[in-house]
Image (cartoon, rainbow, N blue to C red):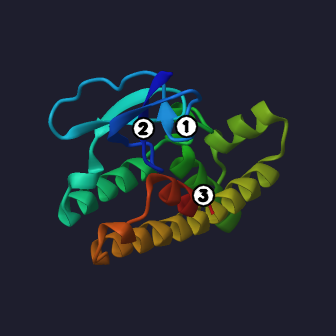
Amino acid sequence: MKKYWLYDTNGWYVGTSVEAEERPADGFEFEPPQTPPGQWPRFNGVGWVVERDYRTETLDEAKQRVLAYLNNAVYIPTGNYPEVEVQTFDLQYQEAKRYVEDGVESELLSILAEAQGRSVDDLAQSIITKHEADIKANIEFVGKVQTLRHRVKKAAKKSHLPTEQQIIDFLKA
């Protein structure tokens, strides 16, 4: 017989253990660690982790936690471009618009076009197209974020709040 410490369907330690020949589906063979007040052990599929015990928080505390997670998820950099390049995007767009609409020559566009082996006309049009697509995507993303914030603020129960994974999935869709 071996001792197993039990957890619920979300992995939270239920505070009891059993002795059995084989490991129960909801049991782990290592004792969970002692935890400070407000935290509780949770089985993550590999071992015990100590986490804030969200089960005891109030609705307002849960809303604050979910909104904080949403805000952090929104501002995670994508890493697609180096920061030095991102800092030039607005200037590139302004120069491209002036070039296309008014025919104003641009040293910046000339340097970039030469470095890329493209014509200034082609580069300018590409910059404008990308910028306009990014603006549309950003507006759609802001709409999603606002929808989630509204949903969180209106939640009448903690069970109505989105999980971290639901937030990620919603923002990626």
| Residue at screen point 17% across, 30% down | 36
Q: Answer few, some or many: residues within 10 Å of disc 1's Cα (few below 14, many 20 plus, some between 14 and 19).
A: some
Q: How many labels does the image show?
A: 3
Q: Answer few, some or many: residues within 10 Å of disc 3's Cα (few below 14, many 20 plus, some between 14 and 19).
A: few
Marking on residue 172? 3
Q: Give the Cα distance between marks 2 and 3.
A: 35 Å
Disc 1 target residue: 24
Q: What residue type is labelled 2?
A: Leu
Instruction: Please state which of the two labelled residues, at mark 1 or mark 3, is closer to the viewer.
Output: 1
Secondary structure of the residue carrying tag 1 is: loop
Sooner in the amino-acid sequence: mark 2 or mark 3: 2
| Residue at screen point 55% across, 37% down | 24
Q: Give the Cα distance between marks 1 and 3.
A: 36 Å
Which image quarter: residue 94? Answer: bottom right
Residue 145 visible in the picture = yes
Secondary structure of the residue carrying tag 3 is: helix
Determine whether 156 is above or below 105 in the image: below
Image location of residue 125, percent across then percent down: 75, 58
Image location of residue 110, percent across then percent down: 71, 40
- On the rendered image, what quadrant is the C terminus found in? bottom right
Determine whether 31 is above or below 76 in the image: above
Q: Give the Cα distance between marks 2 and 1.
A: 8 Å
Determine whether 94 is above or below 132 in the image: above
Identify which residue, 111 or 86, lies in the foreground. Answer: 86
Marking on residue 6? 2
**For residue 124, side relative to residue 135 (left or right):** right
